[in-house]
Image: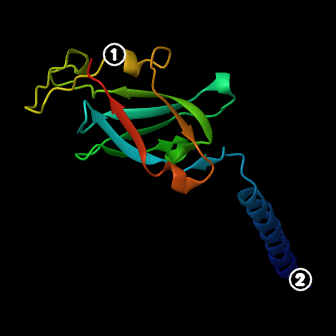
Amino acid sequence: MNNRQSMYGSIAVAISIAGVIVSGCSAKSDAPTMVAVSGTLSIDGKPQENISVTFIPDNSKGTQGPASVGRTNADGKFTLTGPGNRTGAMIGFHKVTVACPFNPAGGSSASGVASDGAAPCKLPLSLADPEKTKLTAEVKSNAAENKNVVLDVSSK
């Protein structure tokens, strides 16, 4: 065997070892277990577009991990996404916050003023505060049970 064959043989062995290491790492993930969650949000019974919905794991009830967030569409529907753009939320109990969008061009969501001609968003500021919100949700391990989370909040 000449030097060239020896060099190529060493490279092939290194690539094989790297492949085993990479495949072993991809099979084992340290990422938290998340389950798909979607639902609808309405304010005073009416769907509201462009509302931020955040599920924050409730540590006091044993749920640990990152928060997940979604934004409502024109029908009030949302789908939660967690870190790394992963769909879903942690299994367990969550504090839920909802907040009007911030409009840097003019109207502030907190004041309920919409500068773009859209209907103003009217939500109590307490619903945007994880320490004050009264909204809660439980994410179940069965994804089918998390497809129709209904959040109906009052503007008062």
Residue at mark 1? 125
Category of crowding for the residue at label 2, using alpha-carbon neighbours closer than 10 angstroms: few (below 14), some (14–19), many (at least 20): few
- Percent position (x, y) of residue 72? 31, 41
Expressed as whole percent of the image width and height from the top left, the position of residue 110 reads 25, 17
Q: Amino acid at mark 2?
A: Asn
Q: Is residue 74 above or below residue 117?
A: below
Residue type marked 1: Leu
> Residue extending furthest front?
45
Quadrant of residue 66 in the image? top right
In the displayed structure image, the side of residue 113 where residue 12 appears, left or right: right
- Marking on residue 2: 2
Real-space CA distance between mark 1 and mark 2, rounded to the nearest whole angstrom:
75 Å
The residue at the point 92 percent across, 85 percent down is 1
Q: Looking at this view, name the residue that lies furthest to the bottom.
A: 1
Q: Earlier in the sequence, mark 1 or mark 2?
A: 2
Q: Are marks 1 and 2 in contact (CB under 8 Å)?
A: no
Q: Give the side of residue 82 with respect to residue 65, left or right.
A: left
Q: Quadrant of residue 143?
A: bottom right
Tag nearer the camera, 1 or 2:
1
Is residue 152 positioned above or below 29 on the image?
above
Residue drawn at 46 percent across, 21 percent down: 134
Residue drawn at 38 percent across, 21 percent down: 127
Q: How is the image coloured?
A: rainbow
Q: Residue 53's x, y, as percent?
A: 39, 34
Q: Nearer the viewer, residue 28 or 145?
A: 145
Q: Residue furthest right?
A: 1
